[in-house]
Image (cartoon, rainbow, N blue to C red):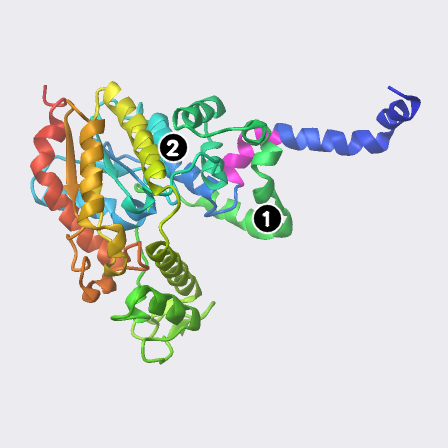
């Protein structure tokens, strides 16, 4: 080491910021920031809150639901348990479905929660069939931010099991919290008072019994009653209906009037984005789709194998989607799902429930009233579909309760 370097290392101007960064890193490593101070509704915060709610809920389920935002928005768990009870069923469910959760994150959630209820013997997997061609080997930062909220060694183990190609950057991401939380810290610095208010609200607010209740009252049908995906995306961007009339929009700070307002800026954006992406996917088959499907189903097998190795079983449910994305829900695609799941579960006790046609939405534009955007149900659709799920689960009660009754 030369004299200039030695002089620099002895300079207080080096040690003050270095010690400040070290202190911040140690604070982040303590877990306090992740537990109380994450940006509300971020991916990392959402999964932490979901786990806290499920772990502290008085509900003792015998069936745990896993899935993406399709299940998170689509199933009203309080309504599901109520509907099952009305039928005289002893099935009790709880949901760990989370927005943005890909299979590797769902698998980690299963590991985090599986010892919470040792008598929970059934996993209900709401399978998002639109994702089977989107599997990739590259690290997904959004899901990485969620997985990094739990055991780092377990998260990295699962990423290897799911065949992700990890570099030193991913290891740094998981082990150095300044890197893990860099985006969240940036948001904190930009608006610290809003974050502090959020922390106060969270500390004062008791945890609910369930992770989410869908309260989205809008429907993407407001933008296109009978049009195509291209019409949907174009109309949502412009804020108009098929005939060009403006869609009444609730402005920020304005009181909601259910007789007047048919959208807001969040809804318009969700409709535009989902319609635009679905339209691109409809007209452009991804390169190497067969390869990505094989990878996806290998990941499904990895998760299912562990569930069965733990003495549990899986019920796979295919959810309903809007009539505008029938290309993602063709009989050919679902038959492929049946075939792959049959191979994955060869010789095992499993069930497959196809609920694509459970709403008036499969090939009927009138069913658009049930959807917030082309993928996700709104509040009305959530209630209707949840009750239909209860009807379909009722015959499986002996299977779900079998080990409890022994």
Question: Dot 2 surroundings within 10 Å: few (below 14), some, or many (20 or more)?
Answer: many
Q: Quadrant of residue 121?
A: top left
Residue 354 bears which disc, if any?
Answer: none
Residue 187 bears which disc, if any?
Answer: 1
At which x and y percent is residue 132? 32, 41
Q: In the rendered image, is residue 56 in sight? A: no
- The chief SS type of the magenta part is helix
Q: Nearer the viewer, residue 222 or 60?
A: 222
| Residue 158 as seen in the image, left or right of residue 325 | right
At which x and y percent is residue 67? 30, 40
Residue at coordinates 33% horizontally, 31% vertically from top-left?
A: 299
At which x and y percent is residue 62? 20, 30
Tag 1 near tag 2, CB within 8 Å: no
Q: In the rendered image, is residue 155 in sight? A: yes
In front: label 1 or label 2: 2
Image quadrant holding the N terminus, namely top right
Based on the picture, tell me whether residue 29 belongs to the magenta stretch.
yes
Region of the chain picked out in magenta, as a range? 27-37
Q: Is residue 49 above or below residue 262?
A: above
**Between disc 1 and disc 2, whose residue precedes?**
2
Question: Dot 1 surroundings within 10 Å: few (below 14), some, or many (20 or more)?
Answer: some
The residue that disc 2 covers is 104
| Residue 151 as seen in the image, left or right of residue 296 | right
Q: Quadrant of residue 398?
A: top left
């Amino acid at each position: 080491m030369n004299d200039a370097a030695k002089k620099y290392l002895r300079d207080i101007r080096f040690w003050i910021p270095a010690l400040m960064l070290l202190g911040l890193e140690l604070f982040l490593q303590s877990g306090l920031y992740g537990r109380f101070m994450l940006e509300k509704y971020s991916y990392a915060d959402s999964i932490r809150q979901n786990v806290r709610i499920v772990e502290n809920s008085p509900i003792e389920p015998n069936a745990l639901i896993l899935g993406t935002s399709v299940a998170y928005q689509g199933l009203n768990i309080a309504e599901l348990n109520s509907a099952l009870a009305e039928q005289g069923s002893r099935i009790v469910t709880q949901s760990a479905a989370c927005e943005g959760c890909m299979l590797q994150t769902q698998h980690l959630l299963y590991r985090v929660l599986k010892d919470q209820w040792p008598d929970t013997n059934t996993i209900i997997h709401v399978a998002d069939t639109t994702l089977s061609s989107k599997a990739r080997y590259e690290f997904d930062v959004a899901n990485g931010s969620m997985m990094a909220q739990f055991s780092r060694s377990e998260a990295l183990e699962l990423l290897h099991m799911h065949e992700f190609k990890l570099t030193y950057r991913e290891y740094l991401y998981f082990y150095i919290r300044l890197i893990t939380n860099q985006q969240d810290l940036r948001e904190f610095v930009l608006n610290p008072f809003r974050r502090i208010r959020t922390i106060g609200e969270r500390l004062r607010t008791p945890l609910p019994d369930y992770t989410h209740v869908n309260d989205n009252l809008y429907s993407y049908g407001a933008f296109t009653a009978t049009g195509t995906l291209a019409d949907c995306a174009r109309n949502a961007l412009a804020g108009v209906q098929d005939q060009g009339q403006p869609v009444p929009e609730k402005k920020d700070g304005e009181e909601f009037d259910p007789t007047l307002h048919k959208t807001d800026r969040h809804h318009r954006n969700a409709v535009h984005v989902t319609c635009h992406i679905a339209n691109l996917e409809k007209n452009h088959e991804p390169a190497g789709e067969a390869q990505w499907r094989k990878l996806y189903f290998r990941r499904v097998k990895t998760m299912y194998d562990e569930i069965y190795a733990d003495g549990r079983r899986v019920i796979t449910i295919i959810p309903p989607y809007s009539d505008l994305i029938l290309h993602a829900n063709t009989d050919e695609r679902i038959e492929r799902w049946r075939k792959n799941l049959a191979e994955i579960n060869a010789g095992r006790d499993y069930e497959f429930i196809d609920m694509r046609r459970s709403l008036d939405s499969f090939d009927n534009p009138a069913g658009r009233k049930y959807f917030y955007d082309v993928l996700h149900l709104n509040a009305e659709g959530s209630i209707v579909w949840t009750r239909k799920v209860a009807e379909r689960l009722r015959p499986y009660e002996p299977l779900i309760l079998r080990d409890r009754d022994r």
